[in-house]
Amino acid sequence: MKRVTALLLSTILLLSGCNAAKDSSTLKDEAKETSKPQEVYIMAGKIEAGEKADLTTKITAKVSKVAVDVGAKVQKGDPLVYLDVKDIEAQVNQAQAGVSTARANLVKVESGARPEQVIQAQAALESAQKNYDTSKLNLERTRQLFNTGAVSQQQMDATETQFAAADAQYKSAQEQLKILSTGETKETLEVLKAQVTQAQAALELAQTQLANGTIYAPIDGIVTYKNINEGEVVSSVTNATLFSIVNTSAMYINAYVPPALTTQMKQGQGVVIKVSENPDKKYQGEISVINSAIDSRNKNVLVKIILKDIDPVLKPGMFAQIALKN
């Protein structure tokens, strides 16, 4: 009996020692946990997409084919919708014909007259010049005789008339040769060049309209909105959004803090982010901008936070809380 009692006392003392050691270890662990600095969430804001594009149509046309739906991942340059552009194709062909005609007219005039026409004009000019020189000399002689009274007023008038006719013929011959030599007058050439320019502008406009018959994704991202169906007519007048694309690979948070707290922050500083949709996970971020101005509405300072972690759970519009890293 004495041996049993002694054994029980030994066992009790051993267990008491283990429990004491265990309690001491637990208290130490709890003390360590308590000594860890706690994160203080001093900022809050909504998650925003780094890139977003709302797409409209630039022409009025019937929808031939819709290539994507909501939720589809697209890359920049992917076709989203095809429009019926048969009428615009006809306009392009017509405009191309107009350019060809205008250019042909300009080339024809710029090429000038045939060589034989120029030779004839040169001969006519030489004849007109001789007639001019003779009439001028005759006028000078007649004027001298008229001044001495040797010829009558009637003869003087007739001589002046002959000279005027010779002068007009000479100038006309000069102009004719000039026209044939240069192809056309400067004014005519300018008009034809302007016609070519106008025709080319009309062609480029039609080609641009034709290119607008296919709507492409301007950024990488996910289609978050679609308001278009095959067979519908879309209009550039209404300017309605047909697609919205959001790039969730680069997201940020615009948060506001009192000016006094900005003294604890610096650009490039790491932060911890949490969202209510996934409360058990903490995300990493970085301060990219600390606005130097105070917002006049809420008297706070805007701080832009870049999200470093990419997680499908994170969506634009979610409310996030931010703590500075110690």
Image: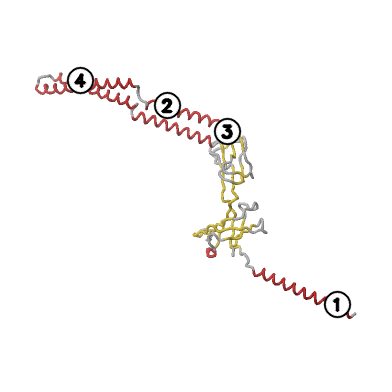
Looking at the rendered structure, the secondary structure element under dot 1 is helix
Mark 1, residue position: 7
Name the spot of residue 67 as percent of width and height, x first: 62, 39
Q: Amino acid at mark 1?
A: Leu
Comes first in the chain, label 2 or label 1: 1
Determine whether label 2 and label 3 are within 8 Å by CB: no
Determine whether label 1 and label 4 are within 8 Å by CB: no
Mark 4 residue crowding within 10 angstroms, few (<14) / some (14–19) / many (20+): some
Name the spot of residue 117 as percent of width and height, x first: 32, 20
Residue 278 lies in what quarter of the image?
bottom right
- Compare residues 145 and 200 and report the one nearer the observer: 200
Q: CA distance from mark 1 to mark 4?
A: 161 Å
Q: CA distance from mark 3 to mark 1?
A: 99 Å
Give the side of residue 154 with respect to residue 191, left or right.
left
- Please name which of the two marks, 2 or 3, marks the residue nearer to the observer: 2
Mark 4, residue position: 162
- Please name which of the two marks, 3 or 1, marks the residue nearer to the observer: 1
Q: Amino acid at mark 4?
A: Gln
Mark 3, residue position: 84
Looking at the rendered structure, the secondary structure element under dot 2 is helix
Comes first in the chain, label 2 or label 3: 3
Identify the residue at image location x=83%, y=77%: 10
Determine whether label 4 and label 2 are within 8 Å by CB: no
Q: Amino acid at mark 2?
A: Ala
Looking at the rendered structure, the secondary structure element under dot 3 is loop
- Please name which of the two marks, 1 or 4, marks the residue nearer to the observer: 1
Q: CA distance from mark 4 to mark 2?
A: 44 Å
Determine whether label 2 and label 1 are within 8 Å by CB: no
Residue, far bottom: 2
Comes first in the chain, label 4 or label 2: 2
Q: CA distance from mark 2 to mark 3?
A: 33 Å
